[in-house]
Image (tube, rainbow, N blue to C red):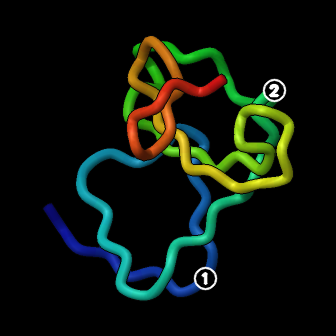
Amino acid sequence: MATTTFSGPVVSDNGFQGDVTVTDFLKLTAIATSALPTAAAANAGQVRLINDNGAGDDEYCLVISTGAAWVTAVGAALS
């Protein structure tokens, strides 16, 4: 597979496949839990940043789709 270097924002309408290496930092846009798509096989493995910690709190949390549910990065079920 070829290696491509980008300078500036990269946008994908359909996600990225394969390995992604981040050498500096990764910036995620935070959304409310209510804005998460329904967990499904099509979004299994997606990582999102929520800004209400699943309980309406003003706390940030990484969540991952298992394909059946959204779970926190430590594996707890999202309330």
Q: Nearer the viewer, residue 41 or 50?
A: 50
Q: Residue at x 76, y 54 (%)?
A: 59
Q: Residue at x 50, y 17 (%)?
A: 69
Q: How far is mark 2 from mark 1, CA to CA?
A: 30 Å
Q: In the picture shown, does residue 11 fall above or below 79?
A: below
Which mark is first along the chain, 1 or 2?
1
Spot occupied by residue 28 in the image (x, y as percentages of width and height): 64, 61
Q: In the picture shown, does residue 20 fall above or below 5?
A: above
Q: Nearer the viewer, residue 64 or 79?
A: 79
Disc 2 crowd rating (10 Å Cα; few below 14, some 14-19, many 20+) is: few
Residue positioned most to the left: 1
Disc 1 crowd rating (10 Å Cα; few below 14, some 14-19, many 20+) is: few
Q: Which residue is mark 1?
A: 8
The answer to whether the residue labelled 2 contacts the one labelled 1, judged by CB atoms less than 8 Å apart, is: no
In the rendered view of the protein, which quadrant contains the N terminus?
Answer: bottom left
Side of 64 where 49 appears, left or right: right
Q: Which mark is residue 56?
A: none
Spot occupied by residue 50 in the image (x, y as percentages of width and height): 70, 46
Q: Which residue is mark 2?
A: 34
Residue type at the position of mark 2? Ser
Side of 26 where 50 appears, left or right: right
Spot occupied by residue 79 in the image (x, y as percentages of width and height): 66, 23
Spot occupied by residue 3 in the image (x, y as percentages of width and height): 23, 74
Q: Residue at x 42, y 17 (%)?
A: 67
Residue type at the position of mark 1? Gly
Q: In the picture shown, does residue 64 fall above or below 7?
A: above
